[in-house]
């Protein structure tokens, strides 16, 4: 690639990959929705403060033995390796059209978003099914040393993943996906053979799904023979997380909202030429307010912990918010892609096959309109922040003990969650709704249909 194409990648055009091609004309001003969502989140703080004043006494895990679970997990491991290879081969050798090729829709929607959702239910599911980890074990690699910097490396890979998706202009080009995953396969095999903690602190999807997995009430037992239910009162024990976890949380929150930030007129007028580097800046818009809230918490509680010590204990309260942001952000893309996947599975390479007799379904219409998408996004964001307040409250009960101190500690977190809620919903609304009141419901918008940004050559 010559220097000219390099600069084209750095300054890509606009992408419509996360829109749905129509808008919802709000029956009331947008501010009503924002105020309502913010008040709902604030109200949850007072409800939780009234009902949860001390840690529950009975918080022991419950184990549900499933004799066939290990065999099911083994079959899913094989399926994971199969879909990884299929994605790589379809991307490299299949049609170079994201509508016809299996790789883009599977990787960005049904793998990435799908595992975010599943990880919210079963926390360590990716640890069990990771196809790169499976390949490494099949090849008999035995790590011989452990690195101390891999946590930061995992954060860097996470930033690169979001840059690829949101800023590169290359995220939906099948051949790029195929070659990136092929190269990443070699990286995983090599690093797993050297670093003992690669699949915990380095591998990007382990870092992402591992943090989101803190939301899950269930996990698979170490021996793969049981499902373990962990009450949140037991799970949220106030343990201290690594400093890199703060980076992971900030990048996940930023990655899910950066697409909305790019839609704003302010960004377009002032920062459009540096959009490719925006993902490096936006995480600080979440990290700095969080640290300020934790600093205020420390002042109000006169805690013996340092600000960073408290921040590393409460960072898990951002896990449900990160999950909610990603699911809300990608929900329109999921809705667009859902009908098409039935056709693509019959012709994954775009060669005109019809393996399962469903190829004609590729041209299916949208399942939901803009109105349903908008209210789904509201629900996901509000519930995510309520869960965040709940997590923070349970942590405060474990860390501060005294009831009055617990309540005081959560005032800054409540304000933070309300601000996050209002800002995120406003950003999500930019490509989807119009603020002018109207009674005619959904109406088409004069924009091109969703399509990835491809640099002009």
Image (cartoon, rainbow, N blue to C red):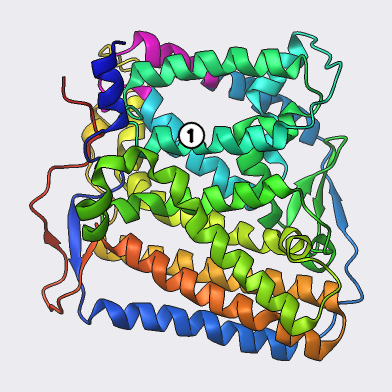
Residue 315 appears in view: yes
Residue 100 visible in this rendered orientation of the protein? no
Q: Position of residue 436 (x, y in %)?
A: 15, 76
Residue at 68%, 31% in the rendered image: 202
Task: Between residue 95 and residue 10, name the one nearer to us.
Answer: 10
- The location of residue 444, given as percent across then percent down, is 11, 57
Residue wearing tag 1? 161
* Relative side of 421 to 152, left or right: left
Out of 273 and 259, give the one closest to the viewer. Answer: 273
Tell me the quarter of the image containing the N terminus: top left
Residue drawn at point x = 69 percent, y = 69 percent: 391
Q: Position of residue 353 (x, y in %)?
A: 30, 14
Q: Foreground: 218 or 8?
A: 8
Q: Is residue 225 above or below residue 372?
A: above
Residue 152: quarter of image: top right
Task: Magenta stretch: give its range.
Answer: 84-102
Residue at (60%, 12%) from the top-left corner?
Answer: 186
Which residue sits at x=81%, y=81%? 302
Give yes or no for residue 213 being in the magenta stretch.
no
The image quadrant of residue 6 is top left
- In the figure, is residue 32 to the left or right of 443? right
């Amino acid at each position: 690639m010559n220097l000219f194409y390099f600069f084209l990648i750095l300054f890509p055009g606009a992408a419509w990959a996360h829109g749905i091609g129509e808008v919802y004309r709000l029956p009331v001003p947008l501010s009503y929705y924002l105020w309502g969502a913010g008040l709902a989140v604030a109200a949850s703080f007072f409800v939780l403060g009234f009902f949860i004043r001390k840690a529950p006494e009975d918080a022991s895990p419950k184990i549900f033995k499933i004799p066939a679970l290990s065999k099911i997990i083994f079959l899913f491991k094989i399926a994971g390796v199969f879909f990884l290879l299929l994605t790589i081969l379809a991307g490299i050798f299949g049609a170079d059209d994201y509508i016809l090729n299996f790789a883009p829709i599977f990787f960005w929607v049904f793998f990435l978003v799908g595992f975010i959702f599943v990880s919210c239910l079963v926390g360590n599911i990716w640890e069990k099914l990771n196809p790169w980890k499976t390949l490494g074990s099949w090849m008999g690699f035995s790590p011989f040393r452990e690195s101390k910097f891999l946590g930061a490396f995992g954060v860097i890979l996470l930033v690169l993943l979001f840059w690829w998706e949101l800023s590169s202009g290359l995220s939906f080009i099948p051949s790029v996906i195929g070659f990136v995953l092929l190269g990443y396969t070699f990286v995983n095999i090599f690093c797993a053979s050297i670093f003992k903690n690669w699949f915990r602190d380095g591998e990007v999807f382990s870092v992402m799904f591992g943090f989101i997995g803190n939301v899950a009430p269930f996990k698979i037992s170490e021996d793969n023979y049981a499902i373990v239910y962990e009450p949140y009162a037991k799970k949220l024990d106030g343990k201290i997380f690594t400093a890199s976890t703060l980076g992971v949380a900030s990048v996940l929150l930023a990655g899910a909202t950066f697409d909305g930030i790019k839609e704003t007129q302010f960004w377009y007028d002032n920062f459009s030429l540096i959009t490719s580097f925006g993902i490096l800046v936006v995480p600080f818009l979440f990290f700095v307010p969080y640290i300020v809230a934790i600093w205020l918490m420390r002042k109000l509680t006169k805690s013996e912990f340092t600000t960073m010590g408290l921040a590393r204990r409460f960072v898990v309260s951002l896990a449900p918010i990160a999950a909610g942001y990603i699911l809300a952000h990608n929900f329109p893309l999921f809705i667009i892609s859902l009908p098409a996947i039935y056709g693509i599975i019959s012709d994954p390479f775009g060669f005109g096959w019809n393996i399962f007799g469903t190829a004609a379904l590729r041209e299916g219409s949208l399942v939901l309109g803009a109105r349903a998408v908008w209210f789904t996004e509201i629900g996901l964001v509000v519930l995510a922040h309520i869960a965040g307040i709940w997590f923070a409250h349970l942590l405060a009960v474990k860390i501060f003990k005294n009831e009055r101190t617990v309540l005081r500690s959560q005032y800054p977190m409540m304000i933070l969650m309300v601000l996050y809620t209002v800002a995120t919903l406003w950003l999500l609304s930019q490509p989807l709704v119009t603020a002018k009141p109207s009674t005619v419901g959904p109406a088409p918008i004069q924009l091109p249909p969703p399509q990835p940004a491809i640099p002009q050559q």
